[in-house]
Image: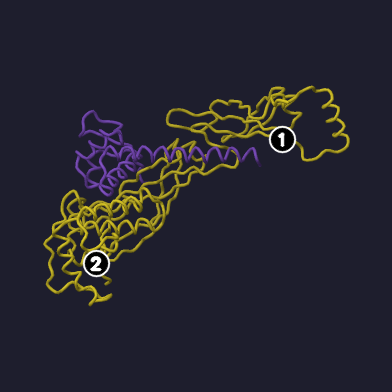
């Protein structure tokens, strides 16, 4: 396997003292940590940096590593630890890495799976948790719905990592909100031996609706009106998530006005939100001669200046 | 059909994350997560939404070697950022209704 130059990974000279190494690690960790960096390659880069630090921060491990590093040029890309090599390092304890399946083959070959052992002690070979995005339609939040989810689960078989497809019918509870996470016990990665499976987390994402916009527990429907409808007032049929309703528009209504329709919003665990009808006056794209004449007559009688606020 | 679970106990949390109770107590003390039930520590129960942030907090504390106060600040900012992004998306969608 390829020899990993941990000093190069951290960007420090081999004689660097622990302070320099710490500073270098922190800088790179801050840059590539997956919780702070959403870029695709960031997590892999972070794991590499974290592994380098794990070895170089401890005097004992660093000394062992330095010993092997002398031979890296000779080996080229066929590095193997000398036969009978045994690391005396102990990786147990709370300081161990949190990423599952974390250390590289190179690391494991030198430190003979000590990292894996401590993980074993810590979590009893429990399966990995998994998280998937779960798109939910607004209509589906109105009542308890069952949905089919398909996802890939990493599986270890004879030391080989592969992925299997799993399919599951899930009961989506009433009133889920966008961004909520739902836990399905035991539906994650398989545990090794008798250890329990990991969990599956569903990250709920409400699918944007062509008609309705979500505002917390409320919904907003934009109602287009002609200028004369807004001027004269009228009754309009408005769609809701659960059927159509009649709405009375008052004369002289304005764009942007909101009319509240109680109880026609999203269902929540503590009741139902409201639906707001948001009025939007729309101009017709063109006018024939007759209509143009009417607009002209209106402009002469109406006596309204919307730009009165602008100074001369 | 699989049961959907919306809660997780302290014991389960410690087991899954490979951390001890004291760490969770620290996280709660710094306001990073709050139990939704349980009068004493051993009875603590968290919403599964908290698990996501709890995990992030533990990772940040360990990986970036920052103290819990800093972790709490980071988590708070990450949450605010998420909320703002969501709100922004909401406004953009609404605005589109008027521009189309």
Disc 2: host chain = A
Picture residue at 28% right of the left edge, 71% below the top: A2
Residue identified by numbered label 1: A282
Q: Nearer the viewer, residue A241 or B55?
A: B55
Q: What is the distance, in whole Å, between disc 1 and disc 2 at their CAs?
A: 67 Å
Residue density around tag 2, few if under 14, some if 14–19, many if 20 or more, within 10 Å: some
- The chain displayed purple equals B
Residue density around tag 1, few if under 14, some if 14–19, many if 20 or more, within 10 Å: some
Give the x, y percent position of residue A312.
73, 26
Horizontally, is A233 left or right of A266 in the view? right
Q: Is residue A101 above or below residue A135?
A: below
Q: Which mark is residue A106?
A: 2
Check whether the beta carbons of the residues at disc 1 and disc 2 lie within 8 A of each other: no
Give the x, y percent position of residue B33.
31, 36
The part of the image, by quadrant, that contains residue A253 is top right
Picture residue at 47% right of the left edge, 46% below the top: A135
Looking at the image, the residue that sits furthest to the bottom is: A74
Disc 1: host chain = A
Q: Nearer the viewer, mark 1 or mark 2?
A: 2
Q: Earlier in the sequence, mark 1 or mark 2?
A: 2
Give the x, y percent position of residue A256.
63, 29
Q: Secondary structure at mark 1?
A: loop
Q: Which mark is residue B28?
A: none
Display colour scheme: by chain
Picture residue at 56% right of the left edge, 42% below the top: A209
The part of the image, by quadrant, that contains residue A80 is bottom left
- The chain displayed yellow equals A
Q: Nearer the viewer, residue A240 or A161?
A: A161
Q: Is residue B90 above or below residue A47?
A: above
Q: Is residue A29 above or below residue A136?
A: below
The part of the image, by quadrant, that contains residue B9 is top left
The quadrant in which the N terminus of chain A is found is bottom left
């Amino acid at each position: 396997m390829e020899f990993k130059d941990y000093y190069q990974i951290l960007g420090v000279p081999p004689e660097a003292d622990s302070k320099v190494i710490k500073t270098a690690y922190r800088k790179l960790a801050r840059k590539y940590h997956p919780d702070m960096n959403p870029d695709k390659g960031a997590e892999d880069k972070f794991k590499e940096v974290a592994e380098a630090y794990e070895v170089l921060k401890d005097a004992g491990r660093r000394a062992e590593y330095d010993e092997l590093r002398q031979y890296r040029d000779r080996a080229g890309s066929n590095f193997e630890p000398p036969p009978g090599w045994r690391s005396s390092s102990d990786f147990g304890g709370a300081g161990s890495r949190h990423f599952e399946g974390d250390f590289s083959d190179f690391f494991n070959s030198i430190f003979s799976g000590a990292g894996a052992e401590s993980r074993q002690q810590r979590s009893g070979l429990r399966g990995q948790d998994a998280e998937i995005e779960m798109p939910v339609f607004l209509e589906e939040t109105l009542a308890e719905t069952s949905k089919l989810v398909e996802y890939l689960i990493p599986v270890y078989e004879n030391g080989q990592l592969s992925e299997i497809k799993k399919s599951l019918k899930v009961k989506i509870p009433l009133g889920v909100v966008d961004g909520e996470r739902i836990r399905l016990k035991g539906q994650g990665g398989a545990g090794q031996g008798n250890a329990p499976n990991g969990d599956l987390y569903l990250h709920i994402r409400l699918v944007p609706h062509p008609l309705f916009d979500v505002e917390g527990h409320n919904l907003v429907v934009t109602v287009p009106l002609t200028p004369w409808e807004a001027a004269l007032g009228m009754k309009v049929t408005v769609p809701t998530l659960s059927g159509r309703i009649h709405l009375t528009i008052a004369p002289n209504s304005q764009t942007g006005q909101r009319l509240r329709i109680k109880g026609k919003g999203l269902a929540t665990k503590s009741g139902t939100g409201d639906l707001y009808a948001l009025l939007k006056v729309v101009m017709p794209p063109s006018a024939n001669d007759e209509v143009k004449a009417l607009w002209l007559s209106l402009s002469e009688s109406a006596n309204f200046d919307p730009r009165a606020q602008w100074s001369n | 059909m699989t049961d959907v679970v919306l809660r997780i106990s302290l014991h389960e949390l410690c087991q899954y994350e490979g951390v001890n109770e004291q760490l969770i107590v620290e996280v709660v003390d710094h306001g990073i997560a709050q139990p939704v039930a349980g009068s004493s520590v051993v009875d603590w129960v968290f919403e599964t939404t908290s698990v996501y942030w709890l995990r992030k907090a533990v990772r940040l504390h360990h990986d970036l070697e920052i103290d819990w106060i800093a972790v709490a600040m980071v988590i708070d900012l990450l949450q605010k950022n998420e909320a703002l992004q969501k709100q922004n998306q909401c406004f953009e969608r609404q605005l589109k209704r008027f521009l189309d």
